[in-house]
Image (cartoon, grey):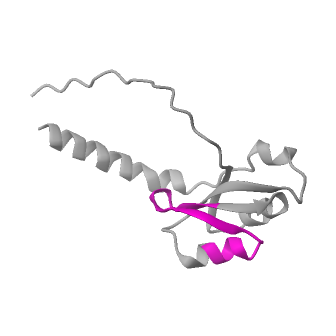
Amino acid sequence: MKHQLLSLTAVAIAGLLPAAAAEKAPLHPYFRSLKPDQEVQVIVRFSGPLEPRHHDLVKSEGGKLEKELKLINGAVYRITRSAVEPLLGKKEVLSISPDAAVNNQKAVAPPVLVEE
């Protein structure tokens, strides 16, 4: 029963991803504070599974691949600020976000009680 509940939850969440992925994100406010030639590390999410053509698209704007993030259909790149908006205008690009460190807040979720 416990495994069935987890499987149903995973299917439900996966069902939400394509709907959420259909909307383009606006320009992140962080980019407005940068000079056009300033280099920045970003996460670019694409509308479908990551393919070499996605890397070529970013490379055509002067970007350099740092790391693939296949789980989110994206990758980490180094690009200049001036490349952000042209890339965001491409139909395959869903979002471009600054790549930032995430700190562990040591938050602990309450246990989930499952009645059998």
Residue 45 x %, y %: 59, 59
Residue that appears at 45% across and 52% down: 17
Q: Which residues are magenta?
A: 55-76
Q: Is residue 83 above or below residue 55?
A: above
39 to the left or right of 25 = right
Front position in the image: 58 or 100? 100
Residue 47 x %, y %: 55, 64
Residue that appears at 71% across and 74% down: 59
Front position in the image: 5 or 59? 59
99 to the left or right of 30 = left
Badge count: 0
Q: Is residue 87 above or below residue 99?
A: below
Residue 16 x %, y %: 42, 49
Q: Outermost residue toward the left?
A: 116
Q: Outermost residue toward the top?
A: 110
Residue 64 x %, y %: 69, 68
Quadrant housing the C terminus: top left
In reply to whether residue 53 is colored magenta, the answer given is no
Residue that appears at 51% across and 50% down: 20
Would you identify the image quadrant in which residue 107 lies? top left
Residue that appears at 77% across and 72% down: 61
Q: Is residue 100 above or below residue 86?
A: above
Quadrant housing the N terminus: top left
6 to the left or right of 45 = left
Would you identify the image quadrant in which residue 8 lies? top left
In reply to whether residue 74 is colored magenta, the answer given is yes
Would you identify the image quadrant in which residue 95 lies? bottom right
